[in-house]
Amino acid sequence: MRVLLRILLIAAALVCLLGASARADTAQSSNWAGYAAHRPGVRFNNVLAHWTQPRASCVRGRRTYSAVWVGLGGFNASSNALEQIGTEVDCTASGRVASSAWYELVPAPSQSIRMSVRPGDQLSASVGVSGSSVTLVLRDSSTHRSFRKTLRAAAIDVSSAEWIVEAPSECISDNICQTLPLANFGSATFSLAAARSVAGHSGSISDSRWDSTQIRLTPTGQHFVLYNDALSVAVPSALANGGRSFRVTFANVAVRGNPLLRARQASLRDGYINHARH
């Protein structure tokens, strides 16, 4: 499994909202799939959800990557912070599944969580913010292990709450990045998803106190252009159970891209993985 060297916030180069306004019901992204809750004037101090660690389908000779997380901030294009915790399911070059856990307080580097997480494990996670303090919690009910840490963050964004499956990005500098191939995670289901506002109101993703945006990961722009290859999409379902659950499903689409980008993609292999904001 390749070492995750550094994770940083990447600015507008990785943002790929296509014609979506701040209150749009749907949006497209080059790296996120899932839902975000947001509304001007609403600030959040907690987000939580449950999910099952996906079982990735790997192919020998092809490295792919996926992450599942909950977080606060990062949805707005002008955001400079994101507080998140989640798990990762990657495929190594040997075709092996690599499963791990991590947290990140953007713009600080990501930190690995020393907790074994296996495909099929039942997980729950939450992010809570009070002032500049961030409390990150990850529980594995299958192994009865848990992680909890409270940190002071250099920057805070609580303007949105997110429940996301992500294709991480690999960077060789703050300005040169490319979205990595998305691992075939099959599907990932979020349940008991909820957020709480600073005003004290708790609700589901579709609560009337805020707006919700469905985000679809699509092969748009050069981040996804490969030559004679299959590109991946991740599609969230409609919300169910009163806005507390949904499923994100992996799919492939065929594309014929630019062979010159193979060399560029190879040059990024010595870079660092980034769990970028939207």
Image (cartoon, grey):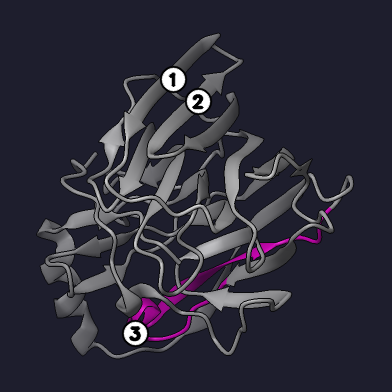
Distance (Cα) linking label 2 and label 1: 7 Å
> Split into 4 quadrants, where in the image is the C terminus?
bottom left
Range of magenta residues:
217-239
State if disc 1 and disc 2 touch (CB < 8 Å): yes
At which x and y percent is residue 258?
Answer: 29, 91
User: From where the camera sits, is residue 29 visible?
Assistant: yes
Distance (Cα) linking label 2 and label 3: 34 Å
Q: Is residue 127 above or below residue 61?
A: above
Mark 3 or mark 1: which is in front?
1
Q: Which residue sits at x=24%, y=87%?
A: 259
At which x and y percent is residue 44?
Answer: 60, 48
Please indicate whether residue 45 sits to the left or right of residue 248 in the image.
left
Residue 68's label in the rendered image is: none
Name the secondary structure under disc 1: strand
Mark 2 or mark 3: which is in front?
2
Q: Nearer the viewer, residue 171 or 200?
A: 200
Mark 2 or mark 1: which is in front?
1
Distance (Cα) linking label 3 and label 1: 38 Å
Report which residue position mark 3 lands on: 222
At which x and y percent is residue 75?
Answer: 51, 65
Tell me which numbered mark, 3 or 1, is placed earlier along the sequence: 1
Instruction: Quadrant for residue 21, please give it.
Output: bottom right
Q: Which residue sits at x=45%, y=30%?
A: 136
Please indicate whether residue 154 sits to the left or right of residue 79 in the image.
left
Report which residue position mark 2 lands on: 138
- Label 3 amino acid? Gln
Crowding around mark 3 (Cα neighbors within 10 Å: few <14, some 14 to 19, many 20+) is: few
Tell me which numbered mark, 2 or 1, is placed earlier along the sequence: 2
- Label 2 amino acid? Leu
